[in-house]
Amino acid sequence: MLHPDSILGTGGDASGEPLLAVDEIQGNVLPGFGANFMTFVGLKIVPGAEDGARRWLRELAPCLTTLRQMTGVREVRRAVARATGVRPQMPDLLLNIVLAHSALAALGLDAGGVEPIFTRSMREANFHDPEGVEWQLGDTPEKSPDVLLIVGSDVETIVTDFVASLPGRLDGLRAVYVEPGALLGGDIEHFGFRDGISQPGVRGRLSERPDHVLTRRYFDSGDPRATTYARPGQPLVWPGQFIFGYPVQVEDDPEMPGLVAEPPAPWMRNGSYMVYRRLNQNVAAFRRFAAEHAPAVSQKLGRAVSAEELQALIVGRWPDGTPLVRSPERPDPAMADDDDAVNFFSYADDEPDARIVVDGTSVTIPGAPADDAASRCPHFAHIRKVNLRDKGTDKGSPLLFRLLRRGIPFGPPFAEGEADGIGRGLLFVSYQRNLELQFMTHVETWMNAPDAPEGFGHDLVVGQSATPRFGDLHNGERLLDAPAATTWIVPTGGGFFFSPAVSVLREL
Amino acid sequence: MAVFYLPPAGFDRDFAQSAQAADLRTNWDEFIGGGIADRDDGALFYDAKSDPAPGVTADRVPIPWNGFPRSLSMFFNAATSPTGARDALRVAEILRPVTAVIIASPQGDVTRFVSWTPGLPTLRAVNADGTLGVPIVPMHRQQDEYCEWHVDRDSNGGIRRISFTAEGPEYWREMASVDPDLVVKLYQELIDPSVVKADLFWQHHVAARVRGTNTFRIAMRKDSYNPYNKWNTTHGVMHLTHPANTLGAEINLAADATVVFPSIPPQPASTFPRRLICCAEFGGVNRSSDPLIGAGVNGAARAGKMVTLANPVGLYMGTIDIGTLRGPQNQPIVQEALKIVRASANNEMILRAEVVAPQGFTLDQCSLGGARLAFGGQIAQKITMRLFGLVKTAPVPGRAGTTDTCGAKCCAKPQAPDFRITVAPNQNCAQVPAGDFDVEAPFTENSPTPETAMQEEAAVPSAAAEKESLDVLAAPPPISRQRNPLKGL
């Protein structure tokens, strides 16, 4: 008998969706670890000891957490949470391995055909990141790991014990970087905003059964969105957008599978490019910016705008996750607490009420008005810059650019009144099939640039620029000026990696 | 009457240096104003020069798109094929033959410039004695996103400079009609000091065939500006050459997109801009620009709001994000290499930009985004183009939109499902002949050329060719503004 979270639910038949290689795809790609604790361990291959490195990775490969295993963990987590109202602490050790370009030759893997950006260090990629900042990894060859271990668990000691045991066990590899991340209470990031709300629903089946799917569908089959959305606000995306060897999204037909994304080299099948980016967050600086600019913004808008509201305008949501499109004047705790409402809105057109089925009962989720002119959520708001939802772009539907985000905060929570400079931030992780089309479009074309995807300014949360940044109102009037580089988010490391299929590592 | 429509980007430096500056400004105002007024039919597209509702404010709305030809990316499956992206980059720089056909109609004859494809006649020179002369085959760039570029190489083949333009051909044609010497001077300054007037102006009449007949008529007069001159094609780039890349097409597209198609519900029209353009056919369905511009305009029209193009009317480069440009020693070089040559005062509207190799090396020794720089298209992929529309903030009484039914639908090329062509709404896509997709296909090293076609024709002399005639008395018809120029030929 299938677990309810892996049954199609409503929305018809998924027999047209591809069968996912559940024992090959690493579990942090799909469905994601979602663990309370994740530590990233960067390893360098010792020159001359490549055989040892291959052997060590080969022996570790059977321990890797696969899509199949991670689906099991997810099912137990959700079942316990449903039954008790409490998220259980799963004691599983979750382990994945990703490889940098620098590892491929040493491991005997063909590097021909990989994306050019994958061959570069992130520091070289130059996203207008502030100069003069020392990076923790990725700026020099010595500090650029060849291999990155991702170690996760809901129980901290499971992670720390494993990581502590590594130095004595490594063969042909040495650790050059260890970075522990931990969820903050309430799934927030350090600025205090709830994070990770919006993720695409990846299509695909977990077994030959036509209704055994990775992503459960909640829409009532009578709702026209039932075949294109998993739940309100969560569109379905074909797996080839993230993993080689599966159908990609067709630009203007979300129900039709596209061509299969053939891997440039055979070993890349069932694999995914991964981006790791260490972002320092200076909470005091962000709040200070908002407090300093709130009076001028109040004057321009002709009403009192608090520092908290200005932060919400920059982000596009209130700290509890309430989207401005649905509730522009204040946070709505009930909405924020409802997974089917908190992400249910569009920009170009009204979202009519949604009928969904939960535990066999039909429930109506109130719709949301459109905000095409950005009178509620500014064009420059972070969540709008990186995901235009129902609004087409020059390069096609926004679904073509979605990422699987698997980041986790690092460092202690911010304490009110604390001085600047405490090490905390976000370990941004994304998986995608095409670095240029997906990650680079997000960073270069949208967040760092004032004129795309809609115009009206930069992403003032994360975007970096060589020139001063700004946010404009829908009529083109300047609302906010900001310095060229953010002082509240400063990149301090990162790299491009590839998450290969488990069998690739097992057969090294 | 005071001049209203300014030159593109408000860039007045060209006109200002002419003894006929006032005439140049007036001529441009009348040219753009005339084009817009022609399309103001009392519905939702309006002429801001005679704003029917000056009391209703208008938001200035940018519409951005990428500068690299998306049609090539889709034709070659660049997103999924390991070799597709490189094929698209390579083919983007192959020049394509251009021709013109005169379309006679009761509404007024027009000259339609189109990419040459087999079956279309070439242009013909007109001899001094008024007889039809030899075929002539000018070339255009197949870069159809209102952003075109040229790669200058040194004697060793190294890339010395890559120049980008977003300037419509009309600006240069109109300027040449008032002050031809100014055009020569600007070519000398911007392209090459050795440019002479004879390079830029036709030295004979040029004739084009009237559609459906064996009669040729003069399409471009002797001494008129030649937009396909060598300094704007094989030897450089001054302005746009693709037949669809015109300011007239921009105006037409914006006006056509105000028509609402009730059979395309709002959600797919907004989310999937191609659904609308496949139905309405106001431009090229495989481009980044046309579907998005159309969808933006149509969204306002669905809300009953009037729209027009912001003054100065033009097509512009916005952000040129090549921060990842690195020299041979991996050193950042964007500050030295990127030159904004012609733009508005604040660089918000860029007409011309160049990437120039710093002293000591060539651009092909550099990398962009980790890849060795080999094609201008790699930089075009980092250029965000844009135009600015005006959208009234509220519906205006007495100005309602018009509706229509779909005149076409799209069919996907089987081997490249994102590449589409439009067919009649009742046509079965499964029965579309493979050759129909070739009409919209890019021109490659292996494509038939007018020369090969002529050789084949010469081998089989046709009776029709012998009856060709030239009507030298008819005036050259105006140039068509259709953004989808191949349609209907």
Image (cartoon, grey):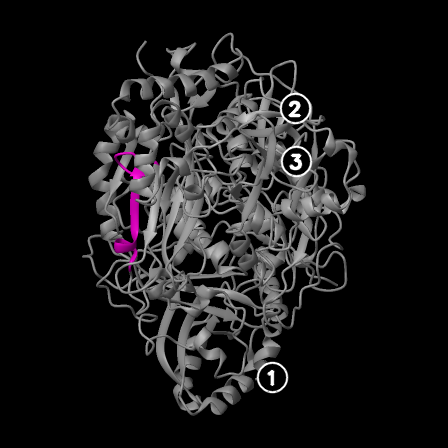
Verify whether residue B343 appears in magenta: yes
Q: Which residue is mark 1?
A: A507
Q: Position of residue A205 (x, y in %)?
A: 69, 60
* Magenta segment: B333-349
The kind of residue tagged 2 is Pro
Tell me the residue at 33%/23% (across/down).
B6
Badge number at residue A267? none
The kind of residue tagged 3 is Pro
The kind of residue tagged 1 is Glu
Residues at marks 2 and 1 touching, judged by CB atoms closer than 8 Å: no
Q: Which element is circle 2 on?
A: loop
Query: Which chain is mark 3 on?
Result: B
Q: Is residue B266 left or right of residue B315?
A: right
Q: Residue furthest front?
A: B129
Q: Position of residue A431 (x, y in %)?
A: 51, 62
Q: Which residue is mark 2?
A: B262
Q: Nearer the viewer, residue B196 or A96?
A: B196
Q: Position of residue B231 (x, y in %)?
A: 41, 43
Q: Position of residue B191 (x, y in %)?
A: 34, 44
